[in-house]
Image: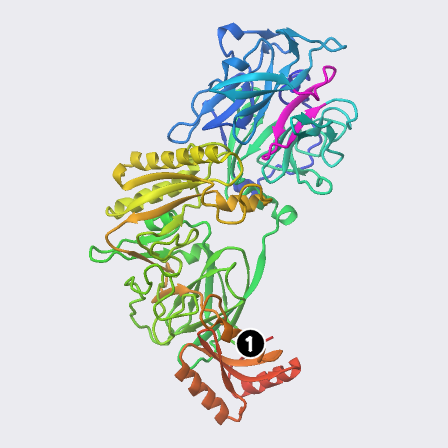
Amino acid sequence: MNIFQHFFSTFIFAILALSVSAQETEEEKKVFINNEATINSDKLEYSPAFYEDGIVFISTKVSNKRFKMKDKRIGKNVMSIFQSKREENGLLLPPKPFSIELLSTVHEGPLTFDRTGETIFFTRNNTKNGKKIKAKDGITKMSIFQAENVAGKWVNITSLPFNDREYNTVHPSISVEGDVLYFSSNREGGAGGMDIWSVQKIGDDWSEPRNLGPSINTESDEIFPFVHADGTLYFASNGHIGFGGLDLFFSRPGGEWTPATNLGAPFNSENDDFGFIIDRDKKNGYFSSSRSGGYGADDIYSFYVSGNLDELFDEDVRPKVVRDFTLMISDNISSEMIEGAMITYTNLDNLSITKAISGGSNPELQVPEDENTDLLLRVPMEEMGMNGVTDFLGKFPVALSTGNYAFVIEKPGYQSRQILVDTENSTEEIFISLDKEVVVADAGLNGDNTTNGSSGSPSTGTDGTGFTDGTNSPGIDGSNVSNGSNGSTGGFSNTIREGSVFQLPNIYYNFNDASIRPDAKVDLDALAGFLSQYPDVEIELSSHTDSRGGSRYNKRLSQKRAENAVAYLIREGLPADRLVAVGYGEDAIRNHCTNGKECTEDEHQYNRRTEVKILRMNNEINIQFVNDTSPPEYVDKASFATGSGSSNSSSTESSDSNLGNYTVIAGVYANYENAEKKQGRLVGMGYAQTSIKTVGNYYHIIVNTFQDRNQALSLQTNLTGDQIKSFLKE
């Protein structure tokens, strides 16, 4: 394209020195890009924008015979706005003209919608009464116009007050709150070429344009801004160092915008890459490119990120929250700390329960026999896991980022065991006891260990961590799900029963879009498999939005999303009378981010979700998570030395306060008689001050406490000499 065309799309085609490696990186392997062949042609297709169930974009296709107007300057038809909706399988349908009201005999260019989709800001040549208005240089410049959707028609088309007929004002992008509009312009006061500017909405008026400054703008062109809901600004530039032509960059707000960061391959190529948009979850999006292998000069590409786009730049812009934990492995009878226990662990966050139940790509499902409704989920630790061994004190330190983890603990001569750890709600020291003999245990899978309407605590009365008395094999306690409650809204439920709720974590929607994306099939196919396997189960499938936008609009959008998901299940052969679609909109916000509250995008994202609630079923379904290669005999939630929510919490605090600064502990018991035996043994060996302290539902063998750390370490040395393993609590 020549420079004139770039006012509507990419402005200047200029090859920069290739300074970024074109070799495939780990980041490239996490991004999947697809040429949207259905909408691309030998014409120009570029600058997509999310709208309803699909996208709108700009093209030089002829919208209809009336508007077959060739621009002699570029040798192509005038540019118009087209729309492509998504069909039932999630793919885009052939495009159609977007709106007859917005068609004209001049160029319509890149656009943006407010969060409700009821206001549009779009680029158009300056005209008055249908005639072009030329600048002093004889060229008709571009300006930004606004229109409103009234009864399905775009009306009240007005030019925005900050336009200047002598300069180009193009490529609008509105913030999620609707209070800041970003655009590109070559007006005076910039760094050179096209710069990115912003204006603030003040009542019904707009402020004077403000240049975003040197972190973003250069002497060359910065164009096609797109502002994400979290404030990140994505844009195209041929002034920052890149692969060649226009490259895609991002910058984050603050006191000053952060330095522009190149999105790298595969988003950028040696040709022009521009017009980038991404959904609120930063997983799916679109961009334009003139890269080789396309259908025309500019094509539209879709992409999917495995994980989250921010994770590709994690070290620089969004480090994960990491906490240090220590697993303490001991003999359940003697409470001796176990050295050399093999510990394998893996993050479970990307493994939805529906994928697990249906035998998805990673986990393996052991199909229950006719008389048994329990499910055994085998987590393939050899493929997904990391491992290590406990030291001579039975300790295994590990640093974990925020999430849910499965730990398998194995030691020859002991019964293997697996625990589930939620790092956000776990204490730093996790105590696990192993049984020496492999005993077939009922694993608590009878569904009777949770009381109706309770918080889900087992009938044995634990501290809320899901640990049962050490004399029995701890089982699946159902502590995440209770009858008639919301249950576990994320991760794994231990027991599925009427009223249980679990989240489908891999279903994402584009902004203001209710259609099912292709990547959502993973969870929906898994759910279909689960429902086919259990024909007595009836569910409510619900969709939730965050609080931004009108409540009525959010309710309609979420209802449509839920209905589309249910329609997908029906097409997979599920009876409609077993499925109920409910759109809650913003009625069930899970945190403080209600209307008017200032929240981060992550906090808003926590509220956007798709959930399944069990309405009716004949028998409860219990799920056991085990190692794929060496299944332990029982599975439970992690056992902790301290915990919250128990009746003993006050006792725990008073005990801890009397332990001193450095406490030498020679064992932790779940059974008081075993603790007494250990205390008597230590006293008999000369450790006369040994006592038993109750911490939560556990009995700590306190050998002594000290104000001086060296004294505590000296005691530990003596205990080691007497073949007594201990650990130091500071």
Q: Residue at x 35, y 44 (%)?
A: 526
In the rendered view, tell whether residue 96 sits above or below residue 729: above
Is 186 in front, or is 9? Answer: 186
Total of numbered circles in the picture?
1
Taking the view exactly as shown, the residue that stands out farthest to the right is 189
Image quadrant of residue 203?
A: top right
Image quadrant of residue 628?
A: bottom left
Image quadrant of residue 564?
A: top left
Residue 473, percent from left and from top: 34, 71
What color scheme is it?
Answer: rainbow
Residue 639, percent from left and from top: 45, 68
Q: Residue at x 73, y 37 (%)?
A: 215
Question: Is 579 inside the magenta-drawn segment?
Answer: no
Residue 324, percent from left and from top: 57, 63
CA neighbours of label 1 inside 10 A, class few (<14), some (14 to 19), many (20+): some
The quarter in which the C terminus is drawn is bottom right
The quarter in which the N terminus is drawn is top right
Report if residue 426 is visible in the image. yes
**Residue at disc 1, secondary structure:** helix
Residue 484, percent from left and from top: 34, 54
The residue range painted magenta reads: 160-185
Question: Is 170 inside the magenta-drawn segment?
Answer: yes
Q: Which residue is mark 1?
A: 656
Is 517 in front, or is 170? Answer: 170
Is 436 in front, or is 9? Answer: 9
Q: Hey, what amino acid is under mark 1? A: Asp
In the rendered view, tell whether residue 467 sits above or below residue 376: below
In the rendered view, tell whether residue 523 sits above or below residue 727: above
Is 273 in front, or is 57? Answer: 57
- Left or right of 529 in this view: 23: right
Q: Residue at x 62, y 82 (%)?
A: 713
Report if residue 272 is visible in the image. no
